[in-house]
Amino acid sequence: GGWEGGGKKGEGKGEEKVKVKEAPGGSVVGMYATQAWTRHARPRVYGDGGCFLFRARPDPVAYRWRPTEEEVADEDGDALLAEQFMVSCPTYLSMGGSKDGGCALRLNEDLTRGESAHAAGFHNDPLGGGEGGGAFEVGLVEVYRLVREIDGRCVDGDDDSAWNLGGFRGG
């Protein structure tokens, strides 16, 4: 069971936006991924600095990847944390990492629970779970894939018209 992203298995191509509506507070938060989400047997980091996090409601804001010089030069592991763009495994998908093990935004395997904390590289405020972040119930998940208007082809060049979201389960 669990989730599985779009695109052909193993290709890791595609640009996806995952939008999450937190219940009952009505916050709308999300993450923009530069590659298709793919389930990995063990946590694996992928993506690049084009990934970003956002809050659409309340108080819209985008948190782009902007690591500080100290994070990049730090030999204590901060550079690795600052480059946790996209992480996935059978039990979760997430973006961003922090020293205390938190993530900027993390969703469980069935997309019904999330958690959020400050993350290195993105320098975000917690996106859900109240003022200090933490765990929250997910009310709705929407996943989008970018398509060119002129010809209807996916921006990643993948001509797979059967973009498979069948592995996603949600509440």
Image (cartoon, helix red, strand yellow):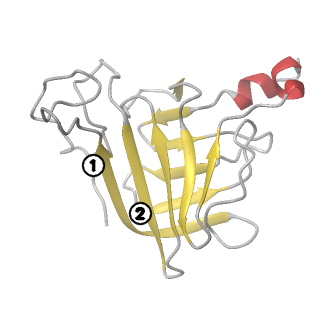
User: What is the x, y in percent for residue 142?
Assistant: 33, 57
Instruction: Name, please, the residue furthest toward the front.
Output: 150
Q: Residue at x 12, y 32 (%)?
A: 151
* Count of numbered circles in the view: 2
The residue that disc 1 covers is 168
Secondary element under disc 1, as helix, strand or loop, is loop
Along the horizontal axis of the image, is 100 left or right of 135? right
Q: From this viewpoint, is residue 61 visible?
A: yes
Q: From this viewpoint, is residue 2 visible?
A: no
Q: Quadrant of the N terminus?
A: top left
Going by the numbered disc 1, the residue's amino acid type is Phe
Q: Quadrant of the C terminus?
A: bottom left
Along the horizontal axis of the image, is 97 left or right of 44? right
Circle 2 packing at 10 Å, graded few (<14), some (14-19), many (20+), is some
Q: How many angstroms separate mark 2 from mark 1 (CA)?
A: 11 Å
Q: Residue at x 68, y 39 (%)?
A: 97
Circle 1 packing at 10 Å, graded few (<14), some (14-19), many (20+), is some
Circle number at residue 34: none
* Label located before the other in sequence (2 or 1): 2
Q: Residue at x 64, y 56 (%)?
A: 116
Secondary element under disc 2, as helix, strand or loop, is loop
Residue contact between numbered discs 2 and 1, judged by CB atoms under 8 Å? no
**103 relative to 76, above or below:** below
**134 relative to 84, above or below:** below
User: What is the x, y in percent for residue 53?
Assistant: 57, 48
Residue 161 quadrant: top left
Residue 77 quadrant: top right
Residue 15 quadrant: top left
User: What is the x, y in percent for residue 78?
Assistant: 81, 28
The residue that disc 2 covers is 112
